Image (cartoon, grey):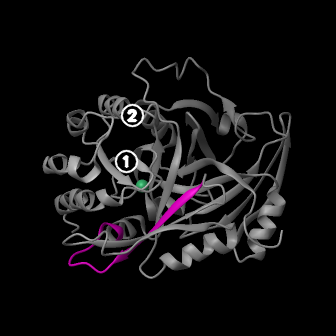
Amino acid sequence: MSSGDLPLRRIDHVRFFVGNARQSAYFYRNAFGFDVLAYAGLETGLKDEAAYLVRQGAISFVLASPLSARHPEQARLALHGDGVQDIALEVDDVEAAYSEAVRRGAVGVRPPTSVEDADGVFISATILAYGDTTHTFLNRDRYGGWHAPGFRPLDPERYGPSTLRPVGLQAIDHIVANVAEGQMDVWVRFYEQVLGFSQLVHFDDKDISTEYSALMSKVVQDGRGRIRFPINEPAEGLRRSQIEEYLQFYGGPGVQHLALSTDDIVTTVRALRERDVTFLRVPASYYDLMPARVGEIEEDIHGLAELGILVDRDDEGYLLQIFTAPVEDRPTVFFEIIQRRGAQSFGKGNFKALFEAIEREQARRGTL
Ligand code: FE2
């Protein structure tokens, strides 16, 4: 490979490092409707951690917790609280992807490692991204087991099929990074140079500032447009921005939100509300202005208003989106639910209403 795109297939899974993976698995199952499929831990031969694989549609999360203070990553918990440790990318050739990424300037965390067990050969390697967030390259073309060596399917007696209404989440649409002031372009260049991504759109602080807080954001995506990573940095505002609040409570740069797609956001959000997922609300006036702002849409605006779903339009169509409150005690990681009807942008027209909603929450936390 000389330059340009690395042959990345897709986001394989996102690994969260959490204080109690067993209880997090219940949360993702009962609140978000994931199936808990596989487990790795003492019973499967792991010595230092327990991990659960949860899946919905094409979305796979691994929730992992250390079993002792000797775990090499245990310091993450005190520093970050629960959060995203790794965004794993499936590749054709792990060794080629890793050596090319390192040649282009990536910091290697773990060189290519091939693990062979009764289920075949599993190959992976890890590079460093923003903060201590990492990207693992993996390939399981010659691996027939569950997820990765060490994982075993869970006893269906323990996690039977859910009787709640299905949530209908389908795929990871994008994953957003928060980085420190002045670092956005550094990380845009990292994704361009190391992974061969290109920059998609650019919002500057005039687009997305509110009275108090502001941010700048650029989006990078892979050559096939399947992997999209917006990168935010705080911009000058009157008060502390939501990005600064995140950086303080996360203890540095990290994943701010994961956007999960659905093809029926009304049904998805109804199901999530029944499961007690908490969403940010915008004022009712948002819906008074909506018809003039976005024009004709297929959905009933009253239904959207009742659920707090936001709409934005671009040249290619429109999108519907809604944001959860942070899903841990620290005001850090949260989720976006998104349905695209043609639009390939990220809801710029909603940023102002949304940030004002976030700032009301910040004011309640005394962190504005
Ligand atoms: Fe987003």
Q: Residue at x 51, y 78 (%)?
A: 185
* 229 relative to 47 in the view: left or right: left
Tell me residue 123's x, y (percent). 80, 50
Quarter the C terminus occupies: bottom left
Q: Could you say which is closer to the camera, residue 303 or residue 21? A: 303
Dot 1 and dot 2 residues touching (CB under 8 Å): yes
**Mark 2 Cα within 10 Å, few/some/many (few <14, many 20+)?**
some
Q: Could you say which is closer to the camera, residue 151 or residue 122? A: 122
* 285 relative to 74 in the view: left or right: left
Residue 156 counted in the magenta span: no
Q: Amino acid at mark 1?
A: Val
Q: Could you say which is closer to the camera, residue 150 or residue 2? A: 2
Q: Does the numbered disc 2 mark a residue whose Cβ is under 8 Å from ligand 1? A: no
In the picture of the structure, the residue carrying the numbered disc 1 is: 327
Tell me residue 293's x, y (percent). 25, 53
Region of the chain picked out in magenta, as a range: 227-243
Residue 235 counted in the magenta span: yes
Report helix, strand or loop for mark 2: loop
* 9 relative to 304 in the view: left or right: right
Tell me residue 100's x, y (percent). 79, 69
Disc with the residue nearer the chain's start (1 vs 2): 2
Quarter where residue 129 is shown: bottom right
Q: Amino acid at mark 2?
A: Ala
User: Marks 1 and 2, how far apart in space?
Assistant: 10 Å
Tell me residue 73's x, y (percent). 59, 60
In the picture of the structure, the residue carrying the numbered disc 2 is: 31
